[in-house]
Amino acid sequence: MSHDYNFQRRETFDTFRESKGVKLPARAVVDFAFFPELEDADWTGITRALAAAGYRVSRPEEDEDEILLASIGPIPISAEEIWKWEEAATKIALKFDFFPDGWELDI
């Protein structure tokens, strides 16, 4: 089954529409979360590919689930800018059988 980028994009833009009235910073680091589909996921491969694309990659120790964070920025905070980086990271992650699990501002 192919990934539904249109749905993912709508979720990001909906987040901004729903946050009207919330004071957002002009720029911030954005963390994109990905989870592996397979037990023997290629953590090294995805880490290298995301780093080569400019993301800082980490695995939160306190997280009980296997989650990979791909962080970028500080970048301008707008739906368009976040989606640009989210889509790029997702395209890389899917090649390694990792799937998007949302994003948050690291402020």
Image (cartoon, helix red, strand yellow):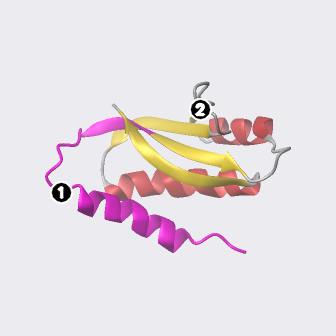
Q: Position of residue 57 (x, y in %)?
A: 61, 33
Residue at 25%, 61% (x, y): give it: 18
Compare marks 2 and 1 and give the one earlier in the sequence.
1
**Residue 17 lies in quadrant:** bottom left
The magenta stretch spans residue 75: no
Cα distance between the residues tagged 2 and 1:
30 Å
Magenta stretch: residue 8 in it? yes
The magenta region covers 1-30
User: Which label number is shown at residue 59?
Assistant: none
Query: In the image shown, does 52 or 40 lie closer to the viewer?
Result: 40
Name the residue carrying label 2. Answer: 63
What residue is at 33 percent from the left and 58 percent from the top?
15
Q: Is residue 15 above or below residue 52?
A: below
- Single out the residue that lies furthest toward the top: 61
**Mark 1 neighbour class, 10 Å CA radius: few under 14, some 14 to 19, many 20 or more:** few
The disc at residue 20 is 1
Q: What percent of the width, then of the height, locates residue 55? A: 56, 37
- Residue at disc 1, secondary structure: loop
- Which residue is situated farthest in the front direction here? 64
